[in-house]
Image (cartoon, rainbow, N blue to C red):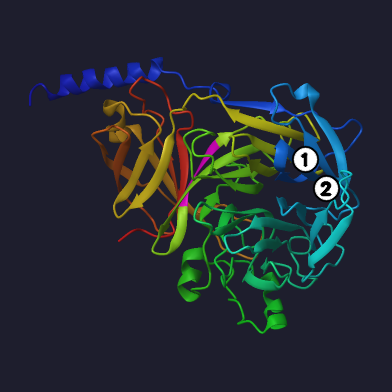
């Protein structure tokens, strides 16, 4: 026992030396971002991206044009060419290629556009569904998905002005069957920025901070669920549906969940300002490793901060939850649609939309490719009854990773209220009391004192190093603890 203090001091000195000498990698070490030249003298505020045969890429613009790009996958981007396929569309925000046609989610309808005579321009326009209303307000966006595993497409309908419901079904998500039937599916939506599916095929959308949304988040569109904003509740009468919940303003999501089982909490909260402030497009990495070590995880675009965030999800007690990490940044405009090709090319369309965004340009079209170098990152975080388990993309240094002082935590929640947004409230400071490294050094089991159900848990692991002495590229994660495992 008399040697414990000197030994601890030496160990602490070594950890400090390791921490001071290690360097974190730069984004360009792992991912190469490149701008794709756009047509001259055109306003290309991109709202959706579709991948076509022969490595053609279709994009729509906010002003209603539909363009086809050739050469976007090539090494030499100076040879990119563009041709206009359609025009005069109504702010399309969702598109995919299927059965020799482009299927487009416009503001008032879901449309199939086909080039029947082979001249490179759409000449047949079929309305598949128009089962919702418009008032003319600029904010009544309609974000739409690709087909789900049953062939249905989903959309999310923004509120009028993001605060009212002056047209039918505003504030709802609809499913459109292959036959064109429109099915009201979820209520409680406020101001979506994108929609997509996780690896299991469940639908998610991003909603922005505002009325009844303390912060922006990624939300699970469980059929029949209420997503939290009651403004559009009145439209349940149009389809003889049960009346959605009427939550109490000034409460907490966890409190109202106990009253209303239909209320599905945000799967992952994106703390305002810390993880962007305007989340948008949703894609899942199904490239089987061609885009790096994050196969099966979800990527989310970000408009204001011009970024892509990374999300790992899990289900606990039948409810989705998980962690968000900062990921890619430095895009030249605010991202709205993102699309990941099978070869590992990430395409991103940007616009500042008059709202402002980071970057030097009003609009942009960019691509990102993995360099082949694996970043040292926290790969996943999963909840345990008494803490969290972390996995890493590379083996960890057992000395730094097993030291509880290498980690720090904070937790908070938000006021669930009819007013705009919320500060972080009910703050606590959970404590990491133990950290156990797995034999293969790729996992660390954290025992935590003071976890709080319903809170966002910020985890900082800035002192953890890889077995080769690397710092974590992104040492901070934000886990939304909707449920604590039994």
- Looking at marks 1 and 2 on the same chain, the residue that comes earlier in the sequence is marked by 2
Dominant secondary structure of the magenta stretch?
A: strand
Mark 1 lies on residue: 351
Q: Residue 157: horizontal and vertical position, in percent?
A: 72, 63
Asked if the residue under mark 2 is in contact with the one under mark 1, i.e. CB atoms within 8 Å, the reply is yes
Please name the residue shown 67% across and 56% down the image.
145
In the image, which residues are magenta?
322-326
Mark 2 lies on residue: 62
Horizontal side of residue 416 vs 389, given as left or right = right
Quadrant (top left/top right/bottom left/bottom right) for the C terminus: bottom left
Whether 40 is drawn above or below 211: the answer is above
Q: Residue 211, which numbered label? A: none
Q: Residue 174: horizontal and vertical position, in percent?
A: 67, 68
Residue 319 in view, yes or no? yes
Residue 244 lies in quadrant? bottom right
Whether 108 is drawn above or below 121: the answer is below
SS assignment at label 2: loop
SS assignment at label 1: strand
Horizontal side of residue 365 vs 427, given as left or right = right
Q: How far is disc 1 from disc 2 in space, using C-alphas? A: 9 Å
Q: Magenta segment: does it hold 342?
A: no
Whether 367 is drawn above or below 450: the answer is above
């Amino acid at each position: 026992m008399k040697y414990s203090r000197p030994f601890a001091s030496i160990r602490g000195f070594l950890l400090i030396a390791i921490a001071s000498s290690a360097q974190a990698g730069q984004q360009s070490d792992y991912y190469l971002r490149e701008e794709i030249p756009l047509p001259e003298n055109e306003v290309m505020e991109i709202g959706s991206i579709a991948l076509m045969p022969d490595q053609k890429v279709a994009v729509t613009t906010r002003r209603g044009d539909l363009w086809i790009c050739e050469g976007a996958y090539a090494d030499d981007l100076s040879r990119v060419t563009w041709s206009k396929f359609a025009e005069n569309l109504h702010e399309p925000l969702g598109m995919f290629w299927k059965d020799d046609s482009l299927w487009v989610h416009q503001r008032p309808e879901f449309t199939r556009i086909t080039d029947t005579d082979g001249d490179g321009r759409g000449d047949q326009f079929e309305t598949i569904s128009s089962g919702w209303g418009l008032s003319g307000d600029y904010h009544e966006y309609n974000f739409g998905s690709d087909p789900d595993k049953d062939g249905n497409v989903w959309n999310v309908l923004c509120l009028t002005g993001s605060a009212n419901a002056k047209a039918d079904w505003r504030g709802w998500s609809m499913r459109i069957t292959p036959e064109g039937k429109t099915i009201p599916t979820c209520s409680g939506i406020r101001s979506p920025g994108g929609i997509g599916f996780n690896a299991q095929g469940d639908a998610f959308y991003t909603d922005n901070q505002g009325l009844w949304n303390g912060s922006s988040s990624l939300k699970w569109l469980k059929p029949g669920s209420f997503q939290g904003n009651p403004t559009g509740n009145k439209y349940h009468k149009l389809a003889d549906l049960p009346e959605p919940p009427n939550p109490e303003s000034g409460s907490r999501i966890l409190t109202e969940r106990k009253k209303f089982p239909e209320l599905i909490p945000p799967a992952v909260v994106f703390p305002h300002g810390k993880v962007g402030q305007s989340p948008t497009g949703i894609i899942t990495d199904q490239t089987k490793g061609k885009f790096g070590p994050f196969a099966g995880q979800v990527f989310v675009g970000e408009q204001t901060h011009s970024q892509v965030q990374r999300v790992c999800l899990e289900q606990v007690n039948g409810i989705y939850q998980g962690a968000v990490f900062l990921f890619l940044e430095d895009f030249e405009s605010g991202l709205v649609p993102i699309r990941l090709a099978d070869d590992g090319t990430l395409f991103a369309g940007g616009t500042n939309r008059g709202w402002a965004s980071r970057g030097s340009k009003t609009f942009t079209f960019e691509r990102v490719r993995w360099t082949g170098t694996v970043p040292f990152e926290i790969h996943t975080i999963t909840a345990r009854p008494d803490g969290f388990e972390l996995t890493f993309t590379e083996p960890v240094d057992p000395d730094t990773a097993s030291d509880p002082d290498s980690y720090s935590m904070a937790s908070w929640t938000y006021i669930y209220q009819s007013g705009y947004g919320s500060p972080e409230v009910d703050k606590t400071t959970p404590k990491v009391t133990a950290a156990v490294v797995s034999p293969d050094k790729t996992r660390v089991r954290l025992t935590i004192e003071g976890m709080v159900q319903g809170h966002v848990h910020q985890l900082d692991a800035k002192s953890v190093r890889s077995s080769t002495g690397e710092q974590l590229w992104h040492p901070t994660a934000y886990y939304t603890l909707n449920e604590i495992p039994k």
